[in-house]
Image (cartoon, rainbow, N blue to C red):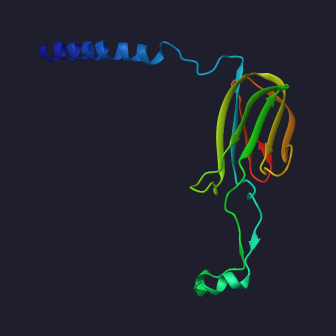
């Protein structure tokens, strides 16, 4: 009888701990996104055009330099910032100038943004200019999209825009 009482007490103690644990893990339900919403993510990592032109060095300037420092031209390192714009149904969701990384602004420009948008049909335009010397946008994506509820659509850039 002593053994049966011990097992019963042990089962009761397990129930005292596990019933609240099961309740807490199932309630309250959490929704990360409303039922009629979708997620649009934009990820760009691209090096802009080099700002400026290379300048030639005449041979008289190279005479005073050591052999390993002599060169025929000096080229700038700075890269153009990316001008990005995301439009959905004609309304601007995002517009920014993304500077180049690096100590001398000579690296790639990177950006990542996530937007919660209503599900359904949309007209999406993604515009980017990677050269300050050119007016307007050098890269464009204009596409009709159909977003389902809770769908995640990623727009990325690698030698052109693509949707996944």
Who's the residue at 75% across and 42% down the image?
83
Residue 85 place in picture, x, y as percent: 77, 36
Residue 125 place in picture, x, y as percent: 83, 34
Rendered position, 95 above or below 31: below
Rendered position, 118 above or below 151: above
Who's the residue at 77% across and 33% down the image?
86
Quadrant placement of the N terminus: top left
Quadrant placement of the C terminus: top right
Q: Which quarter of the figure has residue 150?
A: top right
Rendered position, 54 above or below 47: below
Q: Is residue 145 visible?
A: yes
Q: Is residue 164 visible?
A: no
Q: Which quarter of the figure has residue 78?
A: bottom right
Rendered position, 51 above or below 7: below
In-front residue for pair 73/151: 73
In-front residue for pair 20/131: 131
Residue 123 place in picture, x, y as percent: 86, 29
State left or right for residue 135 relative to residue 23.
right
Who's the residue at 73% across and 53% down the image?
48
Residue 45 place in picture, x, y as percent: 68, 49
State left or right for residue 121 relative to residue 111.
right
Q: Which quarter of the figure has residue 116?
A: top right
In-front residue for pair 1/101: 101
């Amino acid at each position: 009888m002593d053994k049966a009482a011990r097992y019963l007490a042990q089962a009761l103690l397990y129930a005292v701990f596990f019933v609240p644990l099961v309740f807490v893990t199932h309630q309250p339900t959490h929704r990360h996104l409303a039922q009629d919403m979708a997620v649009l993510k934009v990820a760009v990592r691209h090096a802009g055009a080099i700002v400026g032109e290379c300048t030639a060095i005449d041979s008289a300037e190279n005479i005073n330099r050591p052999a390993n420092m002599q060169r025929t031209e000096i080229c700038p390192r700075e890269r153009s910032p990316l001008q990005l714009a995301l439009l959905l149904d004609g309304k601007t969701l995002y517009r920014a100038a993304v500077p180049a990384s690096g100590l001398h602004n000579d690296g790639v420009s990177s950006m990542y943004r996530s937007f919660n948008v209503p599900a359904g049909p949309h007209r999406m335009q993604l515009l980017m200019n990677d050269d300050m010397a050119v007016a307007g946008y050098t890269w464009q994506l204009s596409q009709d999209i159909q977003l389902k509820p809770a769908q995640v659509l990623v727009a990325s850039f690698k030698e052109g825009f693509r949707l996944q």
